[in-house]
Image: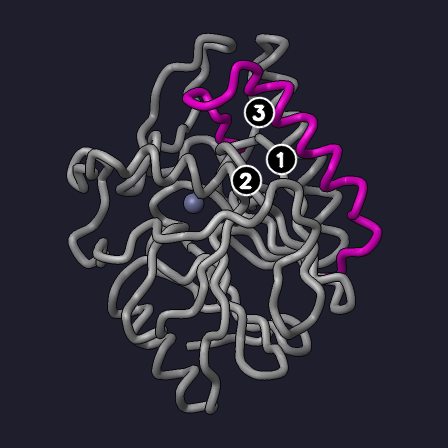
Amino acid sequence: MLKQVAAGVLIHESEFCQSNAVVVQGRSGVLLIDPGVHGSEMDCLADDLSDSGSTVVAGFSTHPHWDHLLWHSRLGAPPRFATALCATTARDRLSNGIDPRRLGIPEQVPLGLLGLVTGLPAESARIPWDGPHVRIIEHQAHAPGHAALLIEELGVLVAGDMLSDVLIPMLDLFGSAEPIEDYLAALRLLEGVAGDVDVLVPGHGSVGGADQMHARIDQDRAYVHALRDADVVKDPRVGGSAEPGWEWVSDVHAGQLLRLAHEL
Ligand SMILES: [Zn+2]
């Protein structure tokens, strides 16, 4: 079921890790960001869109992890965009196929159209589509070529896998030489646009308002600082049960449990 979070912006929440698919209404159809996870959920989303007379005219994947690279044939075959680095990373990592069981991908997930994204020219400022301007804020936290998307005129930030109220910061230990510095730099970038954000939509977790933008940046920064400084991590998000698709590993910096995304 689609839920409106701002004028012309709707979300569809998955049972998998509270993933949020985001629909943005344009002039001739919708932009679909991180379409969803389970096949039945994307099927339901396709029903909701066709009931409202909408077609998908563009897709976007915020970053090259499998739960953000999915698609369903019923959503049509529009261009599916990503940053250049996201697209090349996805292509490289998928070139030898993937092992769904090793990655903890549930059986209900359709993998046939996984990762078929087109990289936008490097440093593209906006998603090319006929709708509200969507600014691309690219950074290297969490995954290579990760994009946060700011729908400027609506004051909506689609954060991808940052600023979640349910998942702690997941550093990119596979793709980054400086994962802590990259994460802090990304938080600074997001802080730089915080004044323009009325609605924050994380890739996983609850939608928040402007106050949550600052609260989550502060909370995430405190967590990353604690990792960097080998401090005790006190974060209410640590200690939940592990869902499929994620694993807990010992973190070398703090001796704490750090929840990491798999390499895809
Ligand atoms: Zn994710």
Most frequent secondary structure within the magenta stretch: helix
User: Residue at left 40%, top 87%?
Assistant: 50
Residue position for label 3: 234
Q: Which mark is residue 146?
A: 2
Position of residue 134 in the picture relative to residue 142 (left or right)? right
Residue 127, compared with residue 215, is above or below; it is below
- Residues rendered magenta in the picture: 169-198
Q: Secondary structure at mark 1?
A: strand
How far from the left and from the top, in percent, is residue 203?
50, 51
User: Residue at left 61%, top 72%?
Assistant: 9
Image quadrant in which you'd find residue 39: bottom left
In contact (CB < 8 Å): disc 2 and disc 3: no
User: Residue at left 45%, top 23%?
Assistant: 175
Gap in angstroms between the C-alphas marked 1 and 3: 26 Å
Assess disc 2: are there few (<14), some (14-19) or many (≥20) residues with their C-alpha within 10 Å of its C-alpha. Answer: many
Magenta span includes 97? no
Q: Earlier in the sequence, mark 1 or mark 3?
A: 1
Gap in angstroms between the C-alphas marked 2 and 3: 26 Å
Residue 19, compared with residue 228, is above or below; it is below
Residue position for label 1: 139
Residue 151, compared with residue 264, is above or below; it is below
Amino acid residing under circle 3 = Lys
Magenta span includes 192? yes
Q: Is mark 2 within 8 Å of ligand 1?
A: no
